[in-house]
Amino acid sequence: MEIIIAKNYDEMSKISAGIIACEIRKRHDLVLGLATGDTPIGTYNALVDMHKKDGLDFSKVKSFNLDEYIGLAPLHPNSYNFFMRENLFKHININSENVYVPQGNTDDPEEFCLWYEEQIRKAGGIDLQVLGIGSDGHIAFNEPGSSLASRTRVKALLKQTIEDNSRFFDKIDAVPRFAITMGVGTILEAKKLLLIASGKKKADVVAEFIEGPVTSQITATALQLHSYATVVLDLDAASKLKRTEYYNWVRDNKQLVQKKVGR
Ligand code: F6R
């Protein structure tokens, strides 16, 4: 895992947008996995800026979102579908036919999950998957105890996640109890992973997932099993890490490291 510690949220967002843009420039028909939540908003804003100012081209990019609340229609203002349109898709030149977000109001979630996996497979797999981390250590909605081999499926949300996400809803009872989510196994099949985290409230779980043992109780620890994972943090989210000096040395000596380890 490559750990990049940025000064603040703004720098974290610019670095992660730069990593995504670099992959799109290398491969115009990149298959990009996307996340929602507060954390990636700055990254998406920076990508929109690159599209508007530098012509970053999304016309051939295909995207797959990680998750969606069960019961919310794509136009519901609290749906992740709506979030993606407002924060990214409507500001860039992505082709709507290339955009995949799980359908929260599907009649048959189980069938939908199989179909979603099939679409990812038909696209040739995800090249770069963007991830956030929940305060309970989840990636996508893979709550504690999720199998590290899990595939796209319906998952019941933990009370802590419902409480965390209630900030977007009028009242806590309005937060859906279930979601469709890519599984940890699905995520681990992406060729590259990029996890971003910001703020003091993520500091404990960030230290646990980077420097603690792999466990299904903190599904983000599965990144330790991936051969190409990058984590971009702001100083607050990185504040409980023990090996900061080492991560910073690797970052500051990137050219030398690349020459020796080829990455
Ligand atoms: C959302 C998702 C979740 C969030 C996580 C952090 O698509 O996959 O795992 O990344 O809950 O959310 P924020 O960024 O709001 O703290």
Image (spheres, rainbow, N blue to C red):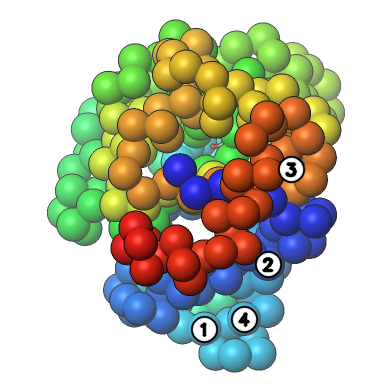
**The C terminus is located in which quarter?**
bottom left
Secondary structure under tag 4 reads helix
Say which amino acid is labelled 3. Answer: Ser
Q: Quadrant of residue 170?
A: top right
Q: Give coordinates of residue 35: x percent, y percent.
A: 54, 46
Residue under pointer 2: 14
| Between marks 1 and 3 in the image, the one whose residue lies nearer the viewer | 3
Look at mark 4 in the image and give the residue it sits on.
50
Of labels 2 and 3, earlier in sequence is 2
Residue at 56 percent of width and 64 percent of height? 253
Residue position marked by numbered label 1 in the rendering: 56
Going by the numbered disc 4, the residue's amino acid type is: Met
Classify 33 as above or below 18. above
Beta carbon of the mark 3 residue lies under 8 A of ligand 1: yes
Q: Which mark is residue 198?
A: 3
Secondary structure under tag 1 reads loop
Give left or right: position of 31 versus 237.
left
Is label 4 in contact with label 3 (beta carbons under 8 Å)?
no
Earlier along the polypeptide chain: callout 2 or callout 1?
A: 2
Q: Nearer the viewer, residue 180 or 170?
A: 180
Q: Does any portion of residue 26 appear in the rendered image? A: yes
